[in-house]
Amino acid sequence: MDVREGTWSALVAGAVSGAQEAVVGTANRWSRGDLADRVGGVGAWLTGLALPRGRPVPALVADTGPALALVIAGAAIGRPIAPLGSRLTVAELAAMARGLGGGVLLAEACFAPLAAEVAWATGSQLVVLPDPLPVGGPRLPAPEADDVAMVLHTSGTTGAPKAIAYRQRALAARVRAYQSVVQLGPGDVFVTAAGFHHIAGLGNLAVAVAAGATVVSFLAFSIDAWRALTPLGVTHALLVPTMIEMLLAADALALPALRWVQYGAAPIHPDTLRAALAALPGVRLANLFGQTEGSPLCVLTADDHHAAITGRPELLSSVGRAAPGVALRVEGAGADGVGELCARGDHVFAPGRDGWLRTGDLARIEPGGYVYLAGRTGDTINRGGENVRPLEVETLLRSHPAVADAAVAGVPDRRLGEEVAAWVVPADESSPPSEEELTGYLRARLAGFKVPRRWAFVESLPRGAAGKLSRRALAETSVPAQGD
């Protein structure tokens, strides 16, 4: 592969060579040379498909080795790959494929039946990846710094998923920012439990492979699958909060070689963090907060975690301070200092015309630079002219010992416009808390207008693969009428 300085492809080309392992799994291992050979072969194969240069190519892929080879090759030849989530419906996948321009849909053989339905719905040509992947081929070209390297979609928890173009220069900057936070490089072994199509999946695998680390092929999270990683020598891991809770409950969080745990994608309870820190002595934890449009934006560092358990417990409720290379500000702040969090930096992928990304997150920035989230701009409930931020109410509900999880949203109300409703997952299904108990608990800690008037007790909440609450799905859930 030809290289051009300042690009993600150049970083990958410098890292993907030699006999050291690039991709490992319980069934197979690829050296860096093996990966480079497959990147060359896939690049030649992609070129032979005569796809329009610069147009993103949707792909249903999951197996880390072949999927990475496809993405690296696509970035080099100017046919950026846009991985799609295999757990989505045909209608959802078709909408995303159409948004990318259509034409061709790539798929691993295991996804061929699903991909065939999507291709039929969009009038696209289905092309199945060769198995085994082709090896070798002519030298791949060097992309420009402003070329698109890959495309990822937002999670769509508050609306239709949006395609975000990751340009070579910005993705290279993300590698540098990430490395400076979690010290990832040659000799390290990285695993992410997030789906390949997600920013926490491919977005971090792209960093790890460019940093020269070994990446683990990890297709689906489970307690047993996590334990099976022991012989692979994992040093760095990314987990979402629900996975950390599951592993803690099974006494399975620790791995012998583990040195770093990165978490994010959804709120984590401070008690869960304290338990994780206790279960992982000597392991450094970091919260890298961001979104598909830019990540990391904030970092709660390993030193911050140490400070939190040695005298500053409030830090466990923060997402940290500005990440390396990122500037933060709050727009439209009220008297409480809460407004929309905005970010600017070299690894922000979708800035506005003025260079600032409006994240849609409500937050305040405390003295010292620590950021505390207060919900999403579109989530605010207008209850008869009073604004209620769901995250504030949810956080308090989750602090009740009888509550395992909780969500709050506005529901239509004839008199007030919107009423505050709560969905509660009891910690013990055989002995759930009562509405009266939770109402009293909140009234002692919140203004009365913020306390939910409508309640539903449920077995679980609608969360995506990364653990993020889907408010679209929540809004479709029936809520008992007031007084029922």
Image: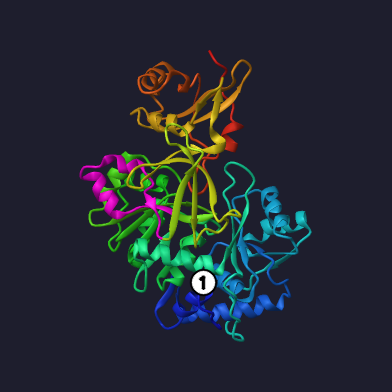
Residue depicted at 35% across the width and 41% down the height:
317
Q: Secondary structure at mark 1?
A: helix
Residue depicted at 59% across the width and 46% down the height:
156
From the viewer's perspective, is residue 453 above or below residue 105? above
- Magenta highlight on residue 227: no
Residue 483 placement, left or right of 19: right
Circle 1: residue type: Trp
In which quadrant of the rendered view does residue 137 lie?
A: bottom right
In the rendering, at what x and y percent does residue 40 appear? 58, 81
In the rendering, at what x and y percent does residue 253 appear? 32, 52
In-front residue for pair 94/126: 94
* Magenta part of the chain: 297-324
Residue depicted at 76% across the width and 61% down the height:
124
From the viewer's perspective, is residue 367 above or below residue 280? above
Name the image quarter holding the C terminus.
top right
In the rendering, at what x and y percent does residue 42 appear? 61, 77
In the rendering, at what x and y percent does residue 472 appear? 60, 37
- Asked if residue 7 can be seen in this view, the reply is yes
Residue 225 placement, left or right of 202: left
In-front residue for pair 193/71: 71
In-front residue for pair 323/287: 323
Which residue sits furthest right?
A: 123
- Magenta highlight on residue 302: yes
Which residue sits furthest top?
A: 483
From the viewer's perspective, is residue 404 above or below residue 468? above
- Asked if residue 27 can be seen in this view, the reply is no
Within 10 Å of disc 1 (Cα), the crowding (few <14, some 14-19, many 20+) is: many
Residue 260 placement, left or right of 16: left
Number of marks: 1
Say which residue label 1 marks: 8
